[in-house]
């Protein structure tokens, strides 16, 4: 019984190669599909993720139902992922190839229509991102980009940014100074 549970039914190297190949194919498909898919996951995206997992399972598993085969696949996936993350953290070139680059979507309060179309982003998605990041309108944004991880990163124009605690403290100090000046003139 234990032999059936633990003994792999395919060579371990084949299991590793199948798993690595499926990983690379899925990475390439996600890379080609772009950052927009990562920006906002919806029900359809979730369905695709489940079906994708089911579709590639047979390519990884073959006829091997052993625990050892499953462990080899899991270890291969984690090792590949860890290795690629380490590589992208240590090499800017690898990071650009593996993860991609940010894409500008707003510059000086104006939408970059070409990039929006290319990414498949609607202006109302950007308007929501602006409101989420303390802006009221796209015209208030100095620079906005969609990162490779699918996050909108927006920098408001200086005149539109909220006051910081340091700004308030500096104003309070100026008020105290003015009060002192006024008090000495009486």
Image (cartoon, rainbow, N blue to C red):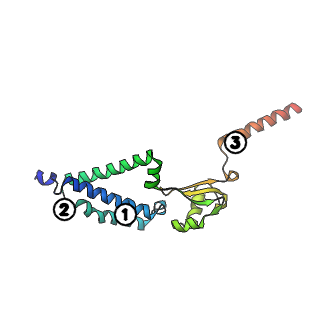
Camera-nearest residue between 12 and 140: 12
Label located before the other in sequence (2 or 3):
2
Q: Residue at x 76, y 38 (%)?
A: 174
Kindly identify which residue carries mark 2.
63
Q: Secondary structure at mark 3?
A: helix
Q: Residues within 10 Å of mark 1 (few under 14, many from 20)?
A: few
Residue 40 x %, y %: 48, 62
Q: Position of 146 compared to 134: left or right?
A: left
Instruction: Determine the residue positioned at 20% across, 53% down.
Output: 12
Q: Where, quadrant-wise, is the C terminus in this rendering?
A: top right
Q: 100 above or below 164?
A: below
Q: Is residue 186 above or below residue 87?
A: above
Query: Which of label 3 and label 1 is nearer to you?
Result: 1
Residue at image coords 49%, 63%: 36
The picture places residue 126, in percent across and down from the top left corner, at 57, 62
Residues tagged 2 and 1 counted as in contact (Cβ below 8 A):
no
Badge 2 crowding class, 10 Å Cα cut-off, few under 14, some 14 to 19, many 20 or more, is few
Front in this rendered view, residue 72 or 25: 25
Residue labelled with disc 1: 49
Q: Crowding near pointer 3: few (<14 within 10 Å), some, many (20+)? A: few
Judging by the rendered image, the residue that carries numbered circle 3 is: 168
Q: CA distance from mark 2 to mark 3?
A: 68 Å
Q: Residue furthest top?
A: 184
In the image as oriented, which residue stretches furthest toward the right?
186
On screen, residue 8 above or below 55: above
Q: Nearer the viewer, residue 183 or 166?
A: 166
- Specify the label residue 22 is tagged with: none
Q: Secondary structure at mark 2?
A: loop
Sequence-first disc among 2 and 1: 1
């Amino acid at each position: 019984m234990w032999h059936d549970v633990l003994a792999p039914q395919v060579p371990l190297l084949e299991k590793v190669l199948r798993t690595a190949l499926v990983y690379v194919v899925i990475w390439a498909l996600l890379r080609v599909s772009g950052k927009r898919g990562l920006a906002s996951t919806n029900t359809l995206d979730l369905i695709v993720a489940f079906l994708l997992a089911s579709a590639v399972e047979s390519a990884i598993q073959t006829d091997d139902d052993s625990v050892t085969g499953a462990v080899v696949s899991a270890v291969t996936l984690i090792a590949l992922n860890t290795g690629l993350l380490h590589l992208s953290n240590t090499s800017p070139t690898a990071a650009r190839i593996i993860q991609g680059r940010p894409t500008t979507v707003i510059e000086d309060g104006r939408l970059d229509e070409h990039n929006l179309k290319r990414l498949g982003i609607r202006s109302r998605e950007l308007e929501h991102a602006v409101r989420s990041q303390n802006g009221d309108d796209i015209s208030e944004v100095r620079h906005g980009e969609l990162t490779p991880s699918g996050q909108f990163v927006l920098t408001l124009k200086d005149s539109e940014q909220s006051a910081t605690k340091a700004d308030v403290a500096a104003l309070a100090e100026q008020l105290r100074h003015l009060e002192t000046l006024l008090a000495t003139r009486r």
